[in-house]
Image: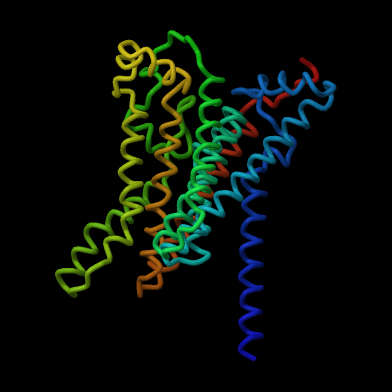
Amino acid sequence: MSENNTDSKKKYTALLHLLFITVTIILSSAPAFRGYVSDTGESLLWCLRIDRFLPIGYVEPACLAIILLLRICIIMTAYLLFSILTKMAGGDLLEIIAGVSLFVFSPYQLYIAYDKVDLTDMLLWILILVFASVSLLIVKAVKDKKIGKIVIFTAVNICVLGGMSLSYLLSHISDSLLSFEEKGYVFGELFTSFFYRDDHPGFGIALFVAVCIWLYYSIINNRRLEIEENITEDKKKNILPIVLYVFAIIFMIFASANFPWDTIVRDIPSIGKIILSLEAPTIFLGLSSFCFTVPAVYAVCNLRKSKNEFIAKIIPALLIFFSVAVGMFLIYQYMYWQCPLNYAKM
């Protein structure tokens, strides 16, 4: 009887996971499902590339199909990453939903998919997610003392990601004389949610709040537990979100308009070529947003441990709701405030 209950519970859990992935794909890929490609960003460039291989009537559907395929790959790799991370953090399905929602519906990810329409960036993010997932599996294997063949597997992944990243940079190298610093963020732009200046998507309100919650639990609440209840948290368990929080701050500084990128480009030409290939500091905001998502997942895990039902259930649900709400509002803007691509009539 107990075995039947266990099997039923596993099937029910698997069904919930499948339902979540399906709903996420439908909501976050709405423009592609609606047959909509914006004429902004690099969509025309990609159409010109596809035009070499297909008749003109098939160019736009092919572009849509590629965008949809890449979005599905991003969602699936994000699900893989946050499933591994949640298991390490001691969470369950709700933490996975929070992590995937904060990442997939982040203003930056929607910006590269539907505003900038840069398929190369989307492919690069798939590789980053795969590499991050493999890295977490390696960390888990080292902790469990199951090292075996993972060193070779790691080397292969590093070579693949490094090679793809290098080819991405070389394909974008430009001798543009435009100031790299002028394309950077001013402080207030980092925290925009529903609207943003051209090529300057922010973090989104849900991610910002989640990181603040993690800071509270990591600094104030842990200290209170040590003083009042003599409970000491295992610091080794919390090292991953701390490390990624530090990296997120570094990337946020790199994205700033005050960082002296122009001086580096001028004084160190070899590094300058690579910097110019990034086109704008927006990529650093994307990396910062990704790194902040890990502490955000740990924040949800901390909330779920609370004995207060409002804190344990309602606040995580609100974080997920606001991350999806901001994302859907931005998708609405992309679909109804921008001109659709009509490549066949150009």
Q: In this view, does 65 lie above or below 19?
A: above
Q: Is residue 278 visible?
A: yes
Q: Is residue 50 left or right of residue 316?
A: right
Which quadrant holds residue 2?
bottom right
Q: Is residue 47 above or below residue 196?
A: above
Give the residue at the far bottom of this rendering.
1
Q: Does residue 262 lie above or below 25 as drawn? A: above
Which of the image's four quarters has the N terminus? bottom right
**Relative to 51, is 104 on the left or the right?**
left
Judge by depth and name the residue closer to the eye, 291 or 196: 291
Residue at the spot x=35%, y=71% of the render?
A: 306
- Closer to the camera in the image, 138 or 324: 138
- In this picture the colour scheme is rainbow
Apparent side of residue 31 relative to residue 344 in the rendered image (left or right): left
The residue at 39%/13% (across/down) is 179
Place of residue 60 in the rendered image (x, y in percent of width and height, measured from the top left): 76, 27
Image quadrant holding the C terminus, namely top right
The residue at the point 62 percent across, 66 percent down is 16
Q: Foreground: 327 or 117?
A: 117
Residue 344 place in picture, x, y as percent: 80, 20
Give coordinates of residue 42: x percent, y percent.
Answer: 61, 22
Whether residue 275 is situated above or below residue 251 in the rendered picture: above
Residue at position x 33%, y 19% from top? 261
Viewer-closest of 218 and 86: 86
Q: Which residue ends up furthest to the left in the rendered image?
A: 227
Q: Can the viewer see residue 102?
A: no
Q: Where is residue 207 in the image (x, y as percent from the top left)?
A: 41, 48
Residue 184 position by quadrant: top left
Q: How many labels does the image show?
A: 0
Q: Is residue 168 left or right of residue 283?
A: right
